[in-house]
Image (cartoon, helix red, strand yellow):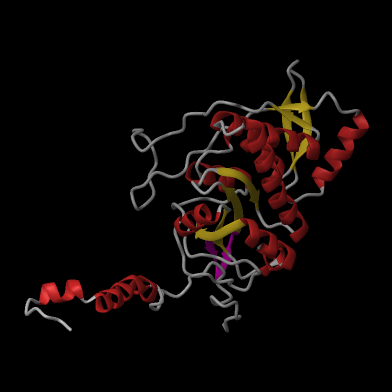
Amino acid sequence: MLDSDDPVRNFAEFKPVRTLLLIAVLALPAFAIDLPKKPTTCARHGTTIDFVESPKEAAAQAKKEEKLVLVLHISGHFEDASLT
Amino acid sequence: MGALTDEKVGKFVNDNFVTSYQKVGTFKIVGNNKQGGNVASYFCAPDGRVLHCVAGPVDAATFLREAQWVVDTLLAANTSSKGEGAKFKEAFRKAHAEKLMNETGLKVEPITWDVETTTDKDALQYKDPSGRPLAPKLPPPPIDGPDVRLSDKEFNDRQKNANAAPGARRQEVVGKGGGVRNVVVNNQAIVHQLLAAHSMQKIETMYGSVFENILGEKVSTKPVDVVRPFSWVDKDGKRLGR
């Protein structure tokens, strides 16, 4: 089928192999995004609200999701459940 | 945990806000007991500028009402300002003054320019143990007194409602004619008074005024990120043993 000893020329002429390789390369990013992700940082801490771990993270996520940011500033004696 | 465990509050907050927390201030140890402890909830734009604040713990209905007010006012200010930043800020400050009038009958003039606050470079600026300056105490605009558009009955009804809200206290106001009058304010009234001049300021310039001037808590350090905001439950909300 291939009438040349030149591998480069053979590759260029052998279209089915080229097509398969192209598909493999194009499919690579799709497999890559299925790699295990960092676990989500949301937690509820006994409330009904999803908390992210820092205001910086909240700001970045809010910008992305076109939401606002809610930041709780807390101090001291929180064992009294009526405080929050 | 009152408001924050309420299903309606959770749904509304999760739908409209991304939430986080920081530890701010300290508490005193008296004998074997801790004293103090409080919470302030800041509703902010994604860049950290404060749109509104709830000072202190409130019930679920109040929290939901305040959160809803932020979203509604944001939409109205967006429409009226047509994308112009200065007009948006002005609209928000006027909205705070209007809300103060609706809830307490008191009149405050919204400030539509930004007050210059202390900076790191000020020679006498107090710094926390990490070397950073604490938040400045922002000057609130003066309360002018009862809104003249209200009848005596309307004003008294609003003052009565204000007296039933958390943090209610009497405050002397000096009218434009020089007369002194005692009026009732509460935590949220002072928040609106403050934000009629300073809303859309960064949260780091605001927390000192809220924690010290409104809640009466001593702030001794800048807000710091913590792993667990509520010390009696773990991250998944399971109650911890003592």
Q: Is residue B194 left or right of residue B171?
A: left
Q: Position of residue B124 (x, y in %)?
A: 37, 34
Q: Position of residue B205 (x, y in %)?
A: 49, 41
Residue sitting at x 34%, y 33% = B123
- Vertical arrangement, residue B61 with respect to residue B154, above or below: below
- Residue A39, picture quadrant: bottom left
- Vertical arrangement, residue A63 with respect to residue B149, above or below: below
Q: Is residue B235 left or right of residue A15?
A: right
Q: Is residue B186 left or right of residue A20?
A: right
In the rendered image, residue B164 lying in the magenta stretch gets the answer no
Question: Residues in magenta?
Answer: B28-37
Residue sitting at x 83%, y 39% = B159
In the rendered image, residue B31 lying in the magenta stretch gets the answer yes
Which quarter shows the C terminus of chain B? bottom right
- Residue B98, picture quadrant: top right
**Whether residue B227 is visible:** yes
Identify the main secondary structure in magenta: strand
- Vertical arrangement, residue B113 with respect to residue B13, above or below: above
- Vertical arrangement, residue B75 with respect to residue B141, above or below: below
Residue sitting at x 83%, y 23% = B148
- Nearest the eye: B211 or A40: A40
- Nearest the eye: B127 or B101: B101
